[in-house]
Image (cartoon, rainbow, N blue to C red):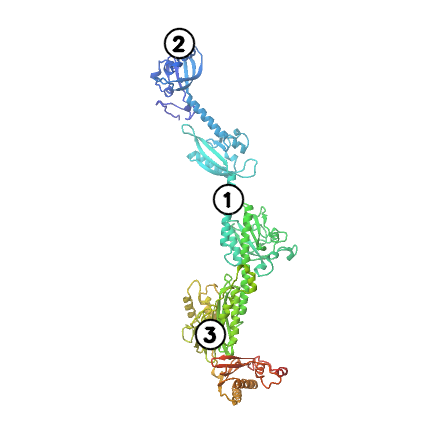
Amino acid sequence: MSEIPETASGGVVWQSSPPGSIYDYIRVASFSIGPDGLVEQWSRRAVDLFGVTAEEARGKDPVEVFMPADLRERGHRRVKEILDGKEWTGLVPFRVPGEERPHGVAEMYVMPTETETGERAALCIVVDVRALRRIETDLAASQAIFGQSPFGFLLFDTDLTVRRANRRFATVFGGDADDHRGRTVHDYLGRAEADRMTSALREVLETGESVTDLRIVGAAPGARDRRHWSINLYRVHSGSGRPIGVAGLGIDVTRRHNAAREAASARRNLALLNQAGARIGNTLDLEATARELLDVAVPGFCDLASVDLYQGLLTGDEAPPGRWGSSHDVGYGAGSAELRRVAFASAVSDTPRRTDEGHASDPGRPGTVPIEVGAVHRYPFNSPYAGALRTGRIRTVHGDDGDLARSTLVVPMTAHDTVVGLVQFSRAKGSEPFGERDRALAVELAARAAVCIDNARLYRREHERALILQRSLLPPGDPEAAGLDIACRYLPGTDATEVGGDWFDVIELPGHRTALVIGDVMGRGLRAAVAMGELRTAVRTLAQLDLEPAEVLSHLDEIARGLGAPIGTQQSRAHKNRGPELSEVYLATCVYAVYDPVTRRCTFANAGHLPPVLVEPGEEALLLDVPPGMPLGVGGEPFEEVEVEIPEGALLALYTDGLVESRDHPLDEGLSAFRRALTDPSRPLEDVCDRVLGSLNTGHGEDDIALLMARVQGLPAEAVGDWRLPREPRSVGRARELARAQLAAWDLEPLVDTVELLVSELVTNALRYGEGEIRLRLLRDRTLVCEVWDAGLVQPRRRRAKDTDEGGRGLQLVGLLSSSWGSRRTPRGKTVWFELALPDGEGTTEPTVEQLLSMF
């Protein structure tokens, strides 16, 4: 159908051609002149151009009406020439009738004609010069922009073929600009990108919505490097608004894309390093640190990764890790030292969790023998992996066509100039290969993890040493004591926590008495374990002096404060630039208890420790009210003693805070749970210990736990012989008689002669050097103990008698014939004692003649 546009004068024009032609822009008008030189016909376009109606123009002299006065004479000559049969073309200023000044300039083409009668006439074609100049200017500007643009410019027709291309586009894609007419985007781009571009062109043509910054990737003809273009598309219309095509402006943004990619890579790397600093090394566990490294690297940095650590490092070998994989250690051609695969991670689906032993890092290499996580393996000597371990330098391994991994970075894990293992980062097919910036990041990630792993190794070594030291200081096996059934438990903290200073001890004292000790050095690590050992040794030494519990704690307090004394003079010189220093101040808590199986009484002293728990038969567990003194090492405060009579079958429990205190619950709840777990003390003591540890929430290894339990089984009355003797010479013979009779009652006749001799010596010394009443006591349990008490304060001293001395050999004889002997102070004097093994025991051998003669 033809369109029917309206003219400015209101007329209707039948138009078969589509609107927007050149005539719509230049607006050609026409009129005719008759033989008399007057206007005969006046077109509607002339009305629009001159602003004069047909009625006003017909029958008028066009020269007189439309031309200025100074041009009319020349105008009459031209009209006369035209009517004589000459054509004329030129520019004619015109004015609107009634106005003196020219209204505009028209370009006029006058063609002579003839009337029906053969008379001369003329047809005038008129164009507004301003419209022509405007079109010329627009065409020149369009040509300048299109042809001189530094960007590629294409004009697509409505069928999406190239109608026109500029020189810049032709420079990139070859040929002349005209050579590209009729082509489509599929002639320039790969299928996927061409389809995207075609879809965008169609959408712009149909909707009129412009598309800006459409990113297209492709390669120019003859070039291998991929280029990135930013395409802007908009629909082009004719003057009447009819769509005539789509214009496309393309800008090469490859440099911008590469710069943005580098910036994004730098930001990603910084983010990864920041993440690595926050996530790697949160534990002091070697395997956990390796897994933390892979959690950071996959998939943010690579698609596949694995970590191998030297087997010797994991087993605690003291050899320098950096030499384990060298040819000097294992021989040329033997490959690397043994490594263990400790971690593997993959962001690629269906990736095998094991890798090739021969290629040893390529998870995507088909047909290989896999290495499982946890497996021990070696790298071939000539492999890049063994080379990286030997040299300590990063290597890059490129995958083959059949491999899943496109490229792999083999990075030695170096800490303090020693290689501790190997980490491998791989990118699969389809991922961007590693660049120099990636290599630097890989080295940094591996170095950070290596330092954490080396720290974990050093910590593990110190932890194991501290644990060995700590366990070596604990009582070996199941401790035994007279009148007590003892069970104990010691649980060290996990590898994630340092060794603490918890300790306990069971010390046999003279007279079949027993010292029960439990303590806790505040602090952790090897130094705490050493301090614990020093205090435990001090406790044993003080216990052999048979001091009262409060005195023992007072001496321990002095010793603990001595542990925090200034560093020695020689060491201070080494630190002279830092001024005088103090070693770590040690504080410790301790309960010291002495149990006497004859009296069934236990004397307690407490230095800031948790109170003991006593469970009497048929009763609930009770926290003993033992005044808690200040911890050892604080000083300045005396310690109090509490004596408690413990019935037969009662249960006494000493423990450290790790058993009853944790982050999850307060101390009171832990103590209550501990007391409830002791509600059935009649069960076997080992079962009671297991029940306590199984029922209490012990914080899952947050702290060390020490538990010492004792069930009271006092010495029966028939196992004790106790007599008081007057201070007179005949008491020596009386003492021998009493001892002989008691040994006969106990069926210990083989010991009669030795006991009579030694009792005579001790009672004689009490009469000669002691004071007050004499007391003789015999105790039978696992050994035989004889005690002689008097009120004198002078302690006996063993000495070597001269050849001319008549006496002074009694204590030498006691020491020679007994298993052990000694003396201790009592509240009202002193006690001298000796101990003999029972006849069915291992006992002591009879003294030789040389030993007896050595006393003289």
| Front of the two marks 1 and 3 | 3
Crowding around mark 3 (Cα neighbors within 10 Å: few <14, some 14 to 19, many 20+) is many
Residue 495, which numbered label? none
Question: What amino acid is labelled 3 in the image?
Answer: Ala
Query: Which comes sooner in the sequence, label 3 or label 2?
Result: 2
Q: Residues within 10 Å of mark 2 (few under 14, many from 20)?
A: few
User: Looking at the rendering, which quadrant does residue 653 occupy?
Assistant: bottom left
Residue of label 1: 263
Q: Earlier in the sequence, mark 2 or mark 1?
A: 2
Q: Which residue lies under the disc numbered 3?
A: 550
Q: Helix, strand, or loop for circle 2?
A: loop
**SS under mark 1:** helix
**Disc 1 from disc 3: Cα separation:** 72 Å
334 relative to 482, above or below: above
Q: Amino acid at mark 1?
A: Ala
Q: Is residue 555 visible?
A: yes
Residue in view at x 41 percent, y 64 percent: 666
The N terminus appears in which quarter of the rendering?
A: top left
Q: CA distance from mark 2 to mark 1?
A: 88 Å
Residue 117, numbered circle: 2
